[in-house]
Amino acid sequence: MTNATGKINLLGLTQPKMEAFFESLGEKRFRAGQVMKWIHHFGVDRFEDMTNVGKVLREKLDACAEIRPPEVVSEDISKDGTRKWVIRVASGSCVETVYIPQNGRGTLCVSSQAGCALDCSFCSTGKQGFNSDLTVAEIIGQVWVANKSFGTIPAKSDRAITNVVMMGMGEPLLNFDNVVDSMLLMMDDLGYGISKRKVTLSTSGVVPMIEKLGEITDVALALSLHAPNNELRNQLVPINKKYPLEVLLPACNRYIARLGDKRVLTIEYTMLKDVNDQPEQAEEMIELLRNTPCKINLIPFNPFPHSGYERPSNNSIRRFQDMLHKAGYQVTVRTTRGEDIDAACGQLVGQVMDRTRRSERYIALRELSADEPVTVQPSVSER
């Protein structure tokens, strides 16, 4: 991607594209590896600091290229160690990136879009509307920013970032090419060297892109399920009307089958009080996933203003978990992290210059309901 002056941002180039770039300059392909290590291993953003690159080449690079990470607007650190960065992208919108340290792991939750084109009814990101897809440099730039803030080199065994999840703002499969290139950089030894098992893409269920993803890469896959039947899922996750469960789950099963090595699908299930947390829904879920190799993450709802939903009681969550456990499923209840800095799952909002006017309507509804509680009815996807 070039800027207004015509310079190409090397931060967003995969190894093949970096090699092609150097060949276009009349340089040897090995220069790509040298520069990628400086960018991703050492966090360098100035060619003059690349000591094993000759002065003539550095000057050539200065004339036609740059290393431009996204602008960091703010960084907040939670009392539990969670970090959140607000990052401004080229469109003028801001997205959020979250780092979660837990049990010896450091998981970075990365955004793929400014806002989200899907309008899941329980997600604050969706209420911000949609502005734009992020470029590769803006996606991998979140990893670059976080990695540099810890002062670690990716090749070190004690690096801070051990896992990356494409679970931030946006639907990753609706920004397919840029997300795939970004994940390739995350896994490349010249990039961040993260195992394919530790790079996870989360989708609400864009079936054609799940099929395409399986032809290109073998990263881990997570499905934002949130309901065990089509009627309820149509309300909570409107894209289900286009790709219902009887189409979606077979696509996920085909993707997982390609991976081998006993790898499984991760099921993400946000629990909403008196909506999807009852024993009958647990029973439906047991039956729905009977033929799907999976592990299940139960996510207690993290409230945001005028969502119309509440967090279930601990007893309801435990009952739901126990039913799934007894049916033979591996089930984890996700611990809420970073809530004091609005970094918990479903709370990411950023500052989206909304092109859909969805946020405008949602704000109007909030103002109307200021004097009395009103349940927000799930809206139809605006795609």
Image (cartoon, helix red, strand yellow):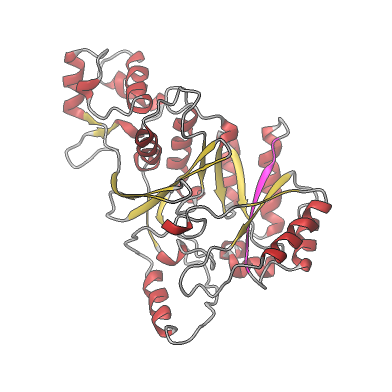
State which quadrant residue 210 falls in.
Answer: top right
Confirm whether the magenta stretch covers residue 245: no
**Horizontal side, residue 157 vs residue 25: left or right:** right
- Image coordinates for residue 371, horizontal then vertical, percent: 43, 87
- Look at 51% across and 82% down and name the residue there: 374
Q: Residue at x 51, y 59 (%)?
A: 346
Q: Position of residue 165 (x, y in %)?
A: 52, 43
Residue situated in front as seen by the camera: 148 or 193: 148
Q: Is 219 situated left or right of 129 in this image?
A: right
Q: Is residue 160 left or right of residue 65?
A: right
Point out the residue furthest to the bottom here: 371
Q: Magenta region: which residues? A: 263-272
Residue at position x 72%, y 45% in the image: 294
Res 358 quadrant in image: bottom left
Choose top left, top right, bottom left or bottom right for residue 258: top right
Q: Give the percent coordinates (x, y) of residue 209.
A: 56, 47
Residue 16 vertical placement versus 263 (above, below): above
Q: Nearer the viewer, residue 258 or 285?
A: 285
**Could you tell me residue 188's position as x and y percent?**
47, 26
Q: Main secondary structure of the magenta part?
A: strand
Residue 265 in magenta stretch: yes
